[in-house]
Image: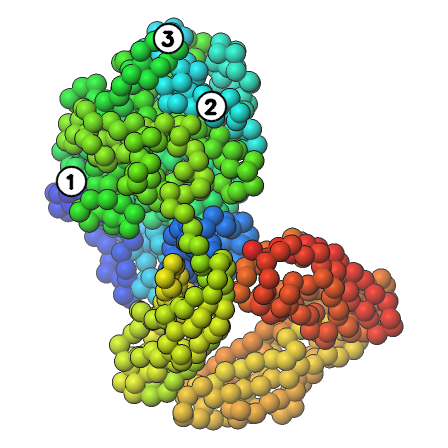
Amino acid sequence: MSRMPKSARTVAVAACLAMAAAMAAAAPAVAAPTAPRVSLGLNGSAPADAHRISATAADRQVSVALSLKPHDQAGLDQFVASLSDPASPNYRHYLTSAQYNMRYAPLQADVDKARAFLKANGLKVTKVADNREVIDASGSAKQVAAAFGTSIGDYTNAAGAHFYANDTAPSVPSSLAGTVQAVAGLTDQPMAHHAAGSAGPAGPGGGYTPAQFRTAYGMTKLSGSYTGAGQTVGLVEFDAFNQSDINAWTSNFNQPSVTPKVVSVDGGVSSPGSGQLEVTLDIDAVASTAPAAAQIAYEAPNTDAAWVDEMAKIASDNQINILSGSWLAGESCESGPINGSHNSFTQMAAQGITLLSASGDWGATGCGYNGDNTTVQADYPASDPLVTGVGGTQLLTSDSAGTYQSESCWNQGSTGNTRSGGGYSQIFAKPSWQTGTNQYRSVPDIALDADYGAGALSVNLNGKWEDIGGTSLASPLMAGYIAMVDQKSKAAGTADVGALNPTIYAIGQSSQYASTFHDVTTGNNNTYSAGTGYDLCTGWGSPQGDNLADPLINGATPPASNDFTIAASPTSVSVNPGQSVTTTISTTVSKGSAESVALSATGLPAGVTAAFSPTSVTAGNSATLTLTASASAAAGQSSVTVAGKSTDASHSTPVSLTVNSSAQSDFSISLSPTSATVTAGKSAGTTVTTAATTQTSPGNIALSASGLPSGASATFNPTSVSAGSSSTVTIATSASTPAGTYQVTITGKSAATSHSSTFTLTVQSGTAGPVTVQNPGFQFGQLGQPVSLQMQASGGTGSYTWSAAGLPSGLSINSSTGLISGTPISSSGFSVTVTATDTSGTSGQAAFSWFIF
């Protein structure tokens, strides 16, 4: 562990509450909000030893990062869990960032709602993350404080550093409770602490060499064939490095040159500072075990808002296989960025990125960086169940080659940042794969060398050699090892190993444990002792690299010999009190032979019952699920889990159920077709159909259109309908209507409610030209999951007739609209050609690939 800047101290929760009471007279009163609000975090963000000087100047500019919730958190969590389940058809079938955005990212409507809130409070939106999960905004301190229901004060800490911080917990209006996850940026004090420590100048021989590490951890066979080539390791950084130091290191150890790509976030870091040793150590450590792996150093200012932005950037870019972080935050004393960055970690896990973090260097007191040496808790992000926490050991070798002799839990002293981080989380519940009886997540999961007193890694820093260690060494050493494992996995035609924890714990509880890990059984971190098997000091121990690689690649538990998939169609249904609704539950054989699958449903809201017909099916067949709401069933939305269980396997699929209000009449509205292409000066049309969705008739429904391009008008025949009737809308364009694609909204409004549907109108120039079909790019789909792809074309004359060749089995194209839909029934790669022909017979084509897994 390294020396921490004194100005980087922040507050523990209990100290915050005590301080808030003591300074009540000095802090300005916050006006009571006029509307209900929900809290976004812990009380205040000033350190326990800080003194409030005054209120922050009202016109001081403050930048914040607003984190939004995924739109299907339950479905996302279920999917991420299935990626590590060898019995799941999703096993290691990762998403691209585009697929993640389509399935799970906050909806554009969520972004618009949050932007409207910020704008209404006078804040300027400066950036929206590509995954739509973080919105950056700025405004005056007065505007920010009012927006988030708090006050902001100027503080000074015991070291004399000045900063601003929020005095009380931030909040948002209750109408945003389902949209907003957290806010960061209400303080400008440094908050990330690195877990690197130095024994001072010692020369290249003061620490272990890369070759000695590979020998000690039994990686020589693996490293003889694999170097991490083709893999990319990402590094979380809040400081910078000198390339000359990296060059000196690789030259000294006769290793391939390493030139990390630097990606700046929120302006990056202009020049190396006090955390330079951390960044340099991370780069050298990765190269120690994966000398040919590419590296990306994400560098951001040391603030909680920049932390959230950095994680969102890494997730959205999706340019790495493995992420290692050695910068830490105490769970209770620096909670600001936790919720926001957990969202990004979830996306990374869905995309197959292995997440690693140093477990910390203050033993079991995770807020030791902030002066709290008594509260027992884990450090974040190692405490996140999606992240593999890497603890520290003292490594002893028996010869100059690095032959493994023994390890003990790292502990170089009774105080300070000198011992392996480990303990229980105060935030995250114990995941299903973790051992023990405690209800919370335990850390670390594994451990490697950290003891810079007995020997860590020799690093060149500003032209001088130092022996640098801490759990900051252990995490990137493991990252380099995983790069070699991923390279071997790809060479065998299999996927990256992705999230490690479920596999590591399965191995730890199997007969493979003794041959794949060094069980570290001696030493302690002043709170917890190492022992046989898993412990809160070294986890499962350190890797025996050559032996561990194949179990990580193959999974500790062999896949079921007979397996199936399960899906629901539709996946979202609504029902009125006193009525029933149905959905079809289909099963498909994915491996072996068809077996009997017993069906069940959980998560039903009060007053709703489920019935399957039949109650069990042979894999490959379907059943009807009927959901019946009693007359007294409460209105609302819930996620019902439909499970199928056979002798060898079990799988589940979610069904979103909405119980409608019994007091309000309602209707639905649909369009057919949903899109059309017209030449400027001509007309296009669609049929609007309404249907009653409650027993009570909604009465007269007036129809209107919005979003029309200039020079265009809409005519309805008739202009209003009753539920269950239809109307024809004709959209007439003029010769001056600009060419382009427009989203026209058709709205039906009754006395009680209104609904709308979108019609895509493509206007092409009145001058005939070639027909061009827009290429949608490489497409992915999942066996048994419905597909909807709207093709677009421009040019030509009049309307288009669509056709397609080579579509995946089960899909078809609508000849009038160009919509490709259906459910894939076979997995393979397909070469698709889509043709659009105008009324004059002129055609255009687009060819692309479609992969169904």
Q: Which residue is mark 2?
A: 221
N-terminal label among 3 and 1: 1
Pointer 3 and pointer 1: residues touching (CB < 8 Å)? no
Number of numbered discs: 3
Q: Earlier in the sequence, mark 2 or mark 1?
A: 1
| Distance between mark 3 and mark 1 Cα atoms | 50 Å
Judging depth in this view, the residue of 6 and 736 nearest the camera is 6
The answer for how far apart the CA atoms under marks 2 and 1 are is 52 Å
* Residue 546 vs residue 838, the one in the foreground: 546
| Above or below, comparing residue 305 to residue 615 in the picture | above
Kind of element beneath mark 3: loop
Element at label 2: helix
Closer-to-camera residue (137/604): 604
The answer to whether residue 368 is seen in the rendering is: no
What secondary structure is marked by label 1? helix
Amino acid type, callout 1: Ala
Between marks 2 and 1 in the image, the one whose residue lies nearer the viewer: 2
Q: Quadrant of the N terminus?
A: top left
Determine which residue is flagged by label 1: 15
Task: Report crowding for label 2: few under 14, some 14 to 19, many 20 or more residues within 10 A (C-alpha).
Answer: few
Give, as a three-letter code, the residue at label 3. Ser
Q: Position of residue 518 (x, y in %)?
A: 30, 27
Report x, y in % for residue 773: 75, 61
Residue in view at x 47 percent, y 65 percent = 594
Identified at 20% across, 27% down, the residue is 521
| Residue at which label 3 appears | 400
Residue 848 lies, in percent from the top left, at 70, 55
Regarding residue 629, the answer to whether it shows in the image is yes
